[in-house]
Amino acid sequence: MNRFAYISGTGSYTPPRQVSNEQLGTVYGVEVPDRWIRRRTGIESRRFAEPGVGSAEMGAHAARAALDQAGLEARDLDLIIVATLSPEHAFPGSGVYLQRRLGLCEGESATFVPALDVRNQCSGFLYGLSVATAQVRAGMARHVLLVGAETHSAAMDFSKRGRAVTSLFGDAAGAAIVSATSEDRGVRDCRLGADGRHADALAQKVWDIRERPFIPVDERGLGRIDPASLWPAMDGATVFKHAVTRMSRALKELCERAGIGLDELDLVFFHQANLRINEAVGKRLGIPEEKMPHNIERFGNTTAATIPLLLAETTRDGRLRRGHKIALVTFGSGFTWGAALIDW
């Protein structure tokens, strides 16, 4: 019997605190003109989590919503995959903290389900989807929880020096349940890529494990980190150019491999890093705007959470429906990129 992998449920969580472009200046001291941000990125506002809230906690909210939509309980899960660049700690990963929040290691519901973390930044959800799909197709799992969650606001440079990067990012979590089915539907293909030649173009080198000690310390033994490595740094022009090229090529190759035309896609879900990047890709490939849903204007770049956040939103409002043929496309730090074809 053929075994297919489909997304049986989606869920999302965004923190209640909404921060407009103006509030970045008036509340946080990051004085970037609203017009400048909108024109270059399309972002109007983003969400920031409260102190004490991390990626696993937000991910748990999104996971419960996805489980509810799938008609499952947490104990039905066979694997947890968490994609994040902002885990609670250097180690362990956020997956085990999410497992604990879902009640899977205590009481009658304890299943000690394995938990896996994926560190592929903006491409994390697509890389995680490829792993989840392979597990299900191979018969190693029936239901895999895939979560993308980010807490960017805790690690941004809220000063004039960091405004170009800080204005882009927000906090959120999105989740999907990848389940087994005998129906001929679901994830058809995943195409992934990476180019480490540009690893430094978008990076946060908060420590260097090659050094001894890996974080410099002063005479009192306190860690001292240079701001150049403490905060995220980005070569915006290089990222923009490669994002347009790589996402365009990944989507074309995906459709060519499947033997379909771009016009046969009902919806294309691009990573929500910069609306102008996505518009450039859409124009290059001739994809109508109505086929490219977006929410970056309200949430900013939530890295590994952008695609599941958008899947959950369009499922709730009816734009994404059973029978739709869709593509997911992403690009991020590394550089890494990916594209997936799904019969919803």
Image (cartoon, rainbow, N blue to C red):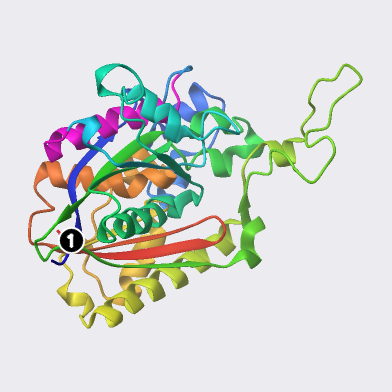
Residue beneath the point at 35% across and 65% down? 339
Residue type for callout 1: Glu
In the image: residue 109, left or right of residue 224 = left
Q: Which residue is denoted by mark 1 in the rendering? A: 290
In the image: residue 264, left or right of residue 273 = left
Question: Depth check: 291 or 173 in front?
Answer: 173
Q: Quadrant of residue 263?
A: bottom left
In the image: residue 40, left or right of residue 160 = left
Q: Quadrant of residue 55?
A: top left
Residue 136 image offset from top left, x and y in percent: 26, 55
Residue beneath the point at 46% across and 72% down? 245
Residue 159 image offset from top left, x and y in percent: 63, 31
Q: In terms of secondary structure, what is the magenta stretch mainly?
A: helix
283 is within the stretch colored magenta: no
Q: Residue furthest right?
A: 219
Q: Quadrant for the N terminus, please.
A: bottom left
Residue beneath the point at 34% across and 63% down? 279
Whether residue 198 is visible to the viewer of this picture, yes or no, is yes
Q: Considering only vertical position in the picture, is 247 above or below 295?
A: below
Q: Give the magenta-colored segment's residue range.
A: 53-72
Residue 68 image offset from top left, x and y in percent: 15, 33
